[in-house]
Amino acid sequence: MQFDTDIGDRHPFFSEVRPGRGFEDIAMQIKEAILQGHLKDGDRLPNERELGSLFGVSRPTVREAIRSLEAIGVVEVRRGVYGGIFVAEPKPDHVGKALAALLRFRGATISELVEFRQTFEAEMAYWAAQRATTKQVEQLVSIANKIKEVAHSSEVPWEKFIELDLAFHEEVAQASRNQIRVAIMLAIHGVLRKTSLMLEKIDDVAWREQQASDLMGIAEAIGEGNAELAQKRMANHIERNISKFN
Amino acid sequence: MQFDTDIGDRHPFFSEVRPGRGFEDIAMQIKEAILQGHLKDGDRLPNERELGSLFGVSRPTVREAIRSLEAIGVVEVRRGVYGGIFVAEPKPDHVGKALAALLRFRGATISELVEFRQTFEAEMAYWAAQRATTKQVEQLVSIANKIKEVAHSSEVPWEKFIELDLAFHEEVAQASRNQIRVAIMLAIHGVLRKTSLMLEKIDDVAWREQQASDLMGIAEAIGEGNAELAQKRMANHIERNISKFN
DNA sequence: AATCATCTAAAGGTATTACCTTTCTTCAAC
DNA sequence: GTTGAAGAAAGGTAATACCTTTAGATGATT
């Protein structure tokens, strides 16, 4: 990625902005440049001062544009020498984070979330059973075992229990080999982490053991490559969660 | 929502920022204030200069924070007298837009998208059949009829055809009464609009008529409240789309 | 009296300029 | 060879002045 920093020449794909919300124009041009393939993941953009010259705007305006792009995970900013503005790598957890913010703020209710989650996760398990690698299956079993251990002792804080549970589901999402599912799963968990803090603690050992048993069953079904079974077990698992929290 | 603009006093829920990325701190505090219910949808924040005083930072720093929040749809900025910074209303199309940007940039491939879409939309039709209002059903039938008319004449540009198709699917999403589904649907369409521009035009009248017939069938199933049928027809409809574009 | 054009104040949008802070690299002293 | 201090690149912040948009108020015209 080469940049022509000479203001006099016309830049290959950047042009000066129109009046109004200049930073929006700039953000759009940079996004477009990425979509068109002129800028690729990891590419470094010119520094803020140079960008200002290129777009014919001041540095604050450039910075506002960068902030917008940074917020939605399009670019990444690093400080120091060899720092700068970089086209962000496709990390699904970035997506998840932003998406979580969206869901949390945009009028989606918890009951809408669980309704969606029910079939979403079941579907995810279905594909995971067909695509999980040996390593991923081992990982799932490993997590399920940890949960089983933890389930018995009511000493373990419920936050720990929840974290293990979420880790399991995220691993299933990964195993389903679909970045969209991974992103949505992470987003949902972002919401759950926030909201579950407001719920009463789960000291119910019987419930914990049921959960552990559920997850182990799902891990086994995925390990056997039995998609329908994995799907069904996951659906039942989520179903039990819903009735517990409603 | 009242604000104490006197710098000397401690603000009820805003506090001065730490060094480093001050704007991040500010964005976080505002988000938190919304989550905690201190700020509600439609509330107007103090103007940029006052916020600067409240947080103990300069105006550019405040603006960068606002840009971040604006990008993810948390706040909305209006100019002019009676303008200002407002907590954004829960408009799912805002979510959809931001989500679309995320999906487009974050390594999700088209084939992952269609795979997800298949069951997602079928599920959506299932719930729509159980929840659609009379008015929504009429709207669906109306759109399906328009598509039917348009299908015959190859005069009508394919962009128009696609728009009608997307409108139908969005109406189904609305009818399913789940904001999460609506947001995801809009996001997917955002991606499709961008990518479909790169595909060859659809002059295939037979295909168009098949589409029109599909949608009419779905609308009818929803109108009858036959959830399983609606689900099945939607799945078949998407299936045909996939085979067409692969 | 109704209507249309102009004025004006509030608030966001931009430009300038100067300086601070972080973070490497480099090179010298030990 | 290790340690440490200086320097340079690039983002982060501050302060200030001025432009632009927008809606309501005001007043003139018909």
Image (cartoon, coloured by chain):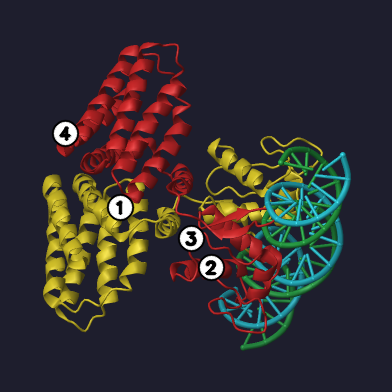
Chain colours: A red, B yellow, C cyan, D green
Question: Is there one chain holding both mark 2 and mark 1?
Answer: no
Residue sitting nearer the eye, C22 or A61: C22
Q: Residues within 10 Å of mark 4 (few under 14, many from 20)?
A: many
Residue under pointer 2: A30
- Residue A229 tag number: 4
Q: Amino acid at mark 4?
A: Leu
Q: Amino acid at mark 2?
A: Ile
Q: How far from the left and from the top, in percent, is residue D13?
A: 75, 51
How much space separates mark 4 and mark 3, taking CA atoms? 39 Å
Is any atom of residue A177 visible in this view?
A: yes
Q: Are marks 2 and 4 in contact (CB under 8 Å)?
A: no
How much space separates mark 1 and mark 4, taking CA atoms? 32 Å
Q: Amino acid at mark 1?
A: Gln
Q: How far from the left and from the top, in percent, is residue C5?
A: 65, 83
Which quarter of the figure has residue A76? bottom right
Residue under pointer 3: A41
Q: Earlier in the sequence, mark 2 or mark 4?
A: 2
SS under mark 2 = helix
Q: Quadrant of the C terminus of chain B?
A: bottom left
Q: Label 1 lies in what chain? A: B
Q: Are marks 2 and 1 in contact (CB under 8 Å)?
A: no
**Would residue B130 appear left or right of D9 to someone viewing this image?**
left
Residue sitting nearer the eye, B234 or A130: A130
Question: Is there one chain holding both mark 1 and mark 4?
Answer: no
**Would residue B217 appear left or right of A79 to someone viewing this image?**
left
Q: Residues within 10 Å of mark 1 (few under 14, many from 20)?
A: many
Which of labels 3 and 2 is toward the front?
Answer: 3
